[in-house]
């Protein structure tokens, strides 16, 4: 990437992104419940939904009686979040510099493999340190990642589909990097009456020991690793790697 070029994630999540990713509401509820259970959240917890997109998890937690705030860098997705819940707490920002006071939240969650977008591990660590800062003592963090030990044997084949009249073609690969292997996805989309658009996505892959070390370096303790939303042990046979950790201290 050229020194002055905008990072891919600054433009990769525009108004077309929801067409490329379809979500069942029941699955969103499963993911939201996983955060509540694995972090053992109390009723009415204050939850920060990082990389919130259009706020589907924030809305689920709100329905369950929690106080939520969502942060994302994508203006188009935040506009949709505000349209779907005008009274919600939505903020545009960068998780390396969170616009929240120290100790403001009981929990923070990064879902849908949204951790590892930055170029360097140092930037990922800065994000984790910011999350640590905004959590109260005893607060918890929940990270949902792709499991690289599973992904290496299950990289999806190239594919093309039509969704709501929009043609979407996708190819993906694991790319080596001096900062750790990355999972890269390239998408081409054609919408009626519009020029073809091309998108690139890239996320660093963390193995279990690596994400544990990163959380420890950020100041977290009581780290646990799981392989699915139900809390099964992490395993190369499972596609997800879920890490939870706590900020030391009494609430």
Image (spheres, helix red, strand yellow):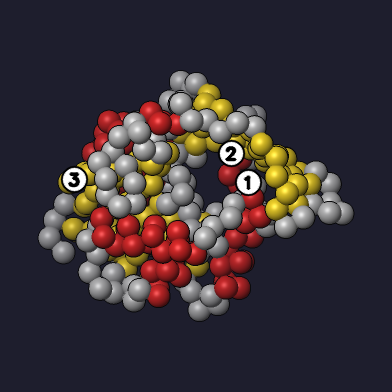
Q: Disc 3 to disc 2, how far (Cα)?
A: 31 Å
Q: Earlier in the sequence, mark 3 or mark 2?
A: 2
Q: Quadrant of residue 60?
A: bottom left
- Position of residue 130 in the picture relative to residue 58 (left or right): left
Question: 225 and 245: which one is in front?
Answer: 225
Q: Which mark is residue 12?
A: 1
Residue 24, horizontal then vertical, whole percent: 52, 60
Pointers 3 and 1 in contact (CB under 8 A)? no
Question: 129 and 203: which one is in front?
Answer: 203
The residue located at (45%, 63%) in the rendering is 26
Q: Earlier in the sequence, mark 1 or mark 2?
A: 1
Pointers 3 and 2 in contact (CB under 8 A)? no
- Position of residue 15 in the picture relative to residue 104 (left or right): right
Q: Earlier in the sequence, mark 3 or mark 1?
A: 1
Q: Disc 3 to disc 1, how far (Cα)?
A: 33 Å
How busy is the neighbourhood of tag 1: few (under 14 within 10 Å), some, or many (20 plus)? some
Q: Secondary structure at mark 2?
A: strand
Pointers 1 and 2 in contact (CB under 8 A)? yes
> Foreground mark, 3 or 2?
2
Q: Residue furthest left?
A: 250
Q: Which residue is mark 2?
A: 201
The residue located at (26%, 60%) in the rendering is 37
Q: Secondary structure at mark 3?
A: strand
Looking at the picture, does residue 234 appear above or below residue 95?
A: above
Total marks in image:
3
Residue 57, horizontal then vertical, whole percent: 44, 63
| Residue 133 can be seen in this image | no
Q: Which mark is residue 50?
A: none
Q: Disc 1 to disc 2, how far (Cα)?
A: 7 Å
Q: Which residue is mark 3?
A: 221
Q: Residue furthest bottom?
A: 87
């Amino acid at each position: 990437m050229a020194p002055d070029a905008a990072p891919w994630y600054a433009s990769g999540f525009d108004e077309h992104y929801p067409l490329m990713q379809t979500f069942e509401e029941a699955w969103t509820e499963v993911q939201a419940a996983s955060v509540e259970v694995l972090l053992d959240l109390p009723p009415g917890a204050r939850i920060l939904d990082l990389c919130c997109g259009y706020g589907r998890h924030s809305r689920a937690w709100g329905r369950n009686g929690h106080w939520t705030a969502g942060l994302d860098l994508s203006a188009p997705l935040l506009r949709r979040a505000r349209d779907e819940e005008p009274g919600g707490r939505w903020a545009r920002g960068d998780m390396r510099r969170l616009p929240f006071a120290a100790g403001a939240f009981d929990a923070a969650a990064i879902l849908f493999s949204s951790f590892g977008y930055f170029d360097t591990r140092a930037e990922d660590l800065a994000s984790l340190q910011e999350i640590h800062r905004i959590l109260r003592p005893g607060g918890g963090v929940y990270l949902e990642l792709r499991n690289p030990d599973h992904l290496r044997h299950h990289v999806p084949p190239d594919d093309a589909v039509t969704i709501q009249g929009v043609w979407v073609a996708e190819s993906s690969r694991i790319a080596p990097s001096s900062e750790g292997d990355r999972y890269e996805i390239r998408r081409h989309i054609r919408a009626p009456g519009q020029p073809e658009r091309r998108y690139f996505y890239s996320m660093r892959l963390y193995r279990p020991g690596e994400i544990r070390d990163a959380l420890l370096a950020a100041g977290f303790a009581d780290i646990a690793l799981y392989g699915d939303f139900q809390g099964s042990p992490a395993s190369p046979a499972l596609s997800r790697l879920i890490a939870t950790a706590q900020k030391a201290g009494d609430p």
